[in-house]
């Protein structure tokens, strides 16, 4: 799909029924590229006019629901406002969104990537979308990750499945880290020495949220969002709206 393709599909949704029946149809924007999904979402909204609209949700690669659930879990465990928070694997769909939500909560966010240029590009993408600044960091090895974590209170591992981003030796005994979260449920996990089922479990003095604890909230958020699409004909479940659902769930 490209933004140029959406008009006929949206016309099919908004002109084949009317009035209250428009609540029976919704537009879902998925895919794996967050920036392209944002462009499609904007294109869909441009086609709507007057009462000719249906509800709309964007969740490319589960980015919004997963990141919203992860940040909601972290928000319940730590004071994010003013805290240094490191997002490892921050260039993927989930990390990009999580970094944006965290920065909007007032956290001082460091976005890690194996490549500094990718981290910088992600930081720019977040600034353009959310109007907040995050600090890019190269975290290609344990030494780089340890540097990024200096003074950090929270670390979220948002890397690809089966990739260890935070070795145990880096976080055990860390003087400031208090809360760890990981969205990778496929072994080996993103944070070595934790379990995917950890739900605020204490490990070596840190509070840990594993991917299943985040995933269970993610599914509640996902279902609540999907249900709300059909309560009215003009719901827009974008990043901010989905995060609001997660905060209230
Ligand atoms: N719990 C849930 O409900 C749920 C839902 C959706 C996704 N997930 C999980 O959330 C995680 C993030 O999803 P995503 O789609 O954002 O991930 P992704 O795009 O596949 O990967 C995120 C980042 O990980 C880094 N990475 C990839 N391969 C790596 C490697 N071999 N070594 C080190 N870093 C590597 C890359 O960053 P750089 O190249 O910039 O270093 C990449 O941008 C995944 O583990 C996914 O399975 C969970």
Image: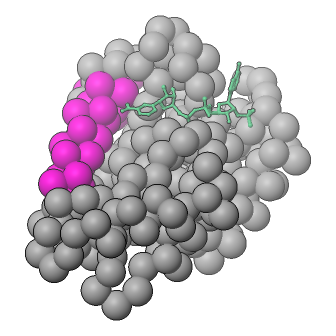
User: Is 35 left, or right, of 62 in this rendering?
Assistant: right
**Is 13 drawn above or below residue 164 in the view shown?**
below
**2 is higher (above) or lower (below) than 131:** above
Percent x, y for residue 10?
43, 65
Which quadrant holds residue 247?
Answer: bottom left
Q: How is the image coloured?
A: one colour
Residue 125 occupies quadrant: bottom right
Is residue 170 a member of the stretch shown in magenta?
A: no
Q: Is residue 76 above or below residue 208?
A: below
Part of the protein shown in magenta: 201-227
Residue 126 appears in the figure: no
Given the current orientation, which residue lies at the most extreme right position?
Answer: 117
Seen at 61% across and 49% down, the residue is: 1
Horizontal and vertical percent position of residue 85: 54, 52
Give the answer, above or below, for where 136 lies relative to 148: below
Most common SS among magenta residues = helix
Question: How many numbered marks, from 0 up?
Answer: 0
Q: Residue at x 68, y 43 (%)?
A: 91
Per the image, is 226 magenta? yes
Q: Is residue 172 left or right of residue 228?
A: right
Q: Residue furthest bottom?
A: 50
At which x and y percent is residue 186?
45, 13
- In the image, taking residue 113 as reference, residue 47 lies left or right, namely left
Taking depth in this image into account, of 246 and 135 the one nearest to the observer is 246
Q: Give the percent coordinates (x, y) of residue 137.
A: 77, 46
Q: Nearer the viewer, residue 181 or 89?
A: 89
- Image quadrant for the C terminus? bottom left
């Amino acid at each position: 799909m490209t933004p140029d393709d959406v008009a006929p599909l949206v016309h099919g949704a908004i002109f084949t029924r009317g009035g209250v029946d428009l609540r029976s149809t919704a537009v879902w924007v998925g895919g794996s590229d967050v920036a392209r999904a944002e462009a499609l979402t904007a294109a869909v909204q441009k086609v709507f006019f007057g009462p000719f609209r249906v509800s709309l949700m964007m969740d490319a690669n589960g980015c919004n629901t997963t990141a919203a659930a992860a940040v909601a879990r972290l928000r319940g465990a730590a004071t994010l406002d003013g805290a240094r928070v490191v997002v490892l694997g921050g260039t993927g769909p989930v990390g990009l969104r999580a970094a944006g939500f965290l920065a909007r909560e007032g956290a001082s966010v460091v976005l890690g990537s194996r490549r500094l240029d990718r981290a910088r590009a992600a930081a720019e993408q977040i600034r353009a979308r959310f109007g907040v600044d995050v600090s890019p960091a190269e975290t290609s090895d344990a030494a780089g990750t340890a540097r990024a974590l200096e003074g950090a209170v929270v670390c979220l591992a948002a890397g690809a499945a089966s990739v260890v981003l935070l070795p145990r030796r880096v976080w055990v005994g860390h003087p400031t880290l208090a809360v760890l979260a990981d969205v990778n449920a496929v072994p080996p996990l993103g944070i070595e020495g934790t379990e995917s089922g950890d739900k605020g479990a204490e490990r070596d003095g840190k509070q840990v949220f594993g991917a299943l604890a985040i995933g269970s909230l993610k599914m509640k958020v996902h279902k609540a969002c999907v249900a709300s699409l059909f309560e009215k004909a003009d719901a827009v479940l974008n990043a901010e709206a989905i995060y609001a659902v997660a905060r209230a769930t």
